Image (cartoon, helix red, strand yellow):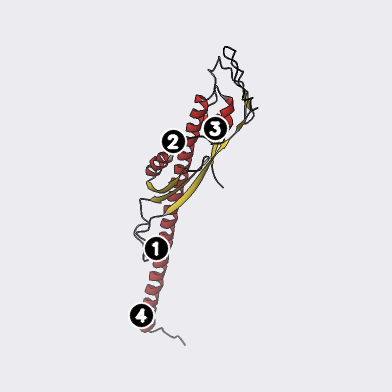
Amino acid sequence: MIFRRGHGDSGQAFPIYITVAAGLLFLALAYLAVGQAAVNRSGAQTAADAAALAAAQDRRDLLAGKWLTDLADPTRWDDILHGLTEVGPSCWRADELAAQNDAQVLRCDDSQPLEVHVEVKTNKTVGDSVVPGVSDIQSTRSATAVIKSICDFDVPDEDVPDEGADAAPLPALHCDGKIWKLDPKKLGDLPKPEDLFDVHLAD
């Protein structure tokens, strides 16, 4: 005997199909919203990293310039290489790099001699989303960059040479496996900022 399915069965299945399809569509849109938020957070972290590194590199360059100014006085080198000297602010570079990455600096701390901490917020929001309350969210992220001297040398005596005497030879700098022999009469070949200091993001 053959049983025929009534037309009512297919009519009942159709609303179920619509409900399942709508649910799947909502899940897809929700996953898309999660992806949008992840991209926004990633952009914020990129901006924070770039801003912190830029500010730290500026601090490195200022310290290297100070070392060059005091090159003839090796007794001051150690303080300079360890950041124990007065230099100008560097957070302006963080502002520049954050702007280039479509973000803005919320806080920049360059008060530590060999460290810069930056917190940024993205200019873009997560965007339209089926998840309530997230469309206007701007991601915030922070980063810390560290400046580290990669040079050492033998600290000379602090005795001042007699007037008219030849200047004492400058101590050699040992920088990350390279030796810089500095002749006060021939200063054409000098270490660059990146030869004196390493700049990297803190772990």
Question: Alpha carbon of mark 4 to alpha carbon of mark 1: how far?
Answer: 28 Å
Q: Nearer the viewer, mark 2 or mark 1?
A: 2
Query: What residue did someone put label 1 on?
Result: 29
Of callouts 4 and 1, which one flags the residue occurring earlier in the amino acid sequence? 4
Contact (Cβ within 8 Å) of mark 4 with mark 3:
no
Q: In which quarter of the image is residue 30?
A: bottom left
Secondary-structure class at tag 2: loop
The amino acid pointed to by label 3 is Ile
Q: Measured along the vertical axis of the image, is residue 29 above or below residue 54?
A: below
Q: Nearer the viewer, mark 4 or mark 1?
A: 1
What residue sits 42% from the left and 66% below the top? Answer: 27
* Residue nearest the viewer, comparing 27 with 156: 156
Q: Which of marks 4 and 2 is in front?
A: 2
Q: Measured along the vertical axis of the image, is residue 54 above or below residue 21?
A: above
Question: Alpha carbon of mark 1 to alpha carbon of mark 3: how far?
Answer: 55 Å
What residue sits 50% from the left and 46% below the top? Answer: 144
Of callouts 2 and 3, which one flags the residue occurring earlier in the amino acid sequence? 3
The amino acid pointed to by label 1 is Leu
Secondary-structure class at tag 1: helix
Q: Residue 186: x and y, percent?
A: 55, 15
Of callouts 1 and 3, which one flags the residue occurring earlier in the amino acid sequence? 1
Of callouts 4 and 3, which one flags the residue occurring earlier in the amino acid sequence? 4
Query: What residue did someone put label 4 on?
Result: 11
Q: Which of marks 1 and 3 is in front?
A: 3
The amino acid pointed to by label 4 is Gly
Secondary-structure class at tag 3: helix
Q: Residue 19: x and y, percent?
A: 38, 74
Of callouts 2 and 1, which one flags the residue occurring earlier in the amino acid sequence? 1
* Residue nearest the viewer, comparing 136 with 115: 115
The amino acid pointed to by label 2 is Gly
Q: Is residue 155 left or right of residue 123?
A: right
Q: Residue 152: x and y, percent?
A: 63, 30
